[in-house]
Image: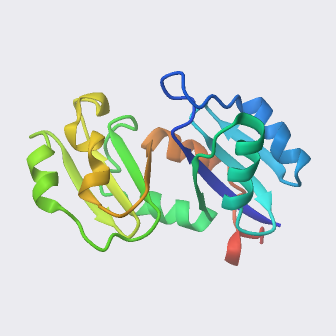
Amino acid sequence: MKTWVVLLRGINVGGKHIVPMKELREALEADGFAAVRTYIQSGNLVFDFPGPPETRIGELIEKNFGFSPWVLALSPEELRQAAAANPFRDDAGKTVHFFFLDREPETVNRDLAEELRAHSEQWALTGRVAYLRAPDGIGRSKLASKMDRVFPGTQITARNRNTVEKLLGMLPEETGPGGEPS
């Protein structure tokens, strides 16, 4: 069994695509997922499963809740690397957001990013993670709301630094290659 961190995009937002976490945990456990833990209602999961879980989770949510969200699975090491690469580690957890991309972007529309970026905001890209420091609030950020246009051709889901740190705390202390406990 390997440990996985899964981020679901667009669930329990604005009264749409409702997925109660308790019911999701029960569905996953009934389907062979082990040690399933969730964090808040926005689709953050940590569990053990033998192989890549994206397709299986999408199918389970479709079957149980009537829609199929975008599912991003990360190994513990990928999440740890994303946290370590955060260039805004000294900023408060709700002001820094991690935008996880499905792959490294082939193109980055830096002109659009600069046009949308508020004076107080800063952003950076490292591999498959874009970081946004938005001290005036993410809800006010034009850049945050259009991040998918900055990285065309990618799928994106975002989490604030507090959520990333909570997920890190839900992981086993050390994992070996492939997310297996060492």
Relative height, residue 94 to residue 175 (above, below)? above
15 versus 35 height, above or below: above
Q: Image check: 23 left or right of 175?
A: right
- Residue 65 in which image quadrant: top right
Is residue 89 shown left or right of residue 121? right
Snapshot quadrant of residue 21 = top right
> For the view shown, which residue lies furthest in the top direction?
15
Percent x, y of residue 17: 59, 32
* Quadrant, the N terminus: bottom right
Left or right? Give the position of 107 relative to 65. Answer: left
Front residue of 137 and 150: 150
Q: Which residue is drawn at 14% across and 44% down?
A: 116
Q: Where is residue 170 in the image (x, y as percent from the top left)?
A: 67, 47
Near-viewer residue (52 or 64): 64
Position of residue 15 relative to residue 32, above or below, is above
Name the residue: 33% across, 57% down.
130
Q: Position of residue 119 (x, y in %)?
A: 9, 40
The quadrant in which the C terminus is found is bottom right
Q: How many marks?
A: 0
Is residue 40 shown left or right of residue 36?
left
Residue at 81 percent of width and 46 percent of height: 28
Tell me, what colour scheme is on the image?
Answer: rainbow
110 or 164: which is nearer to us?
Answer: 110
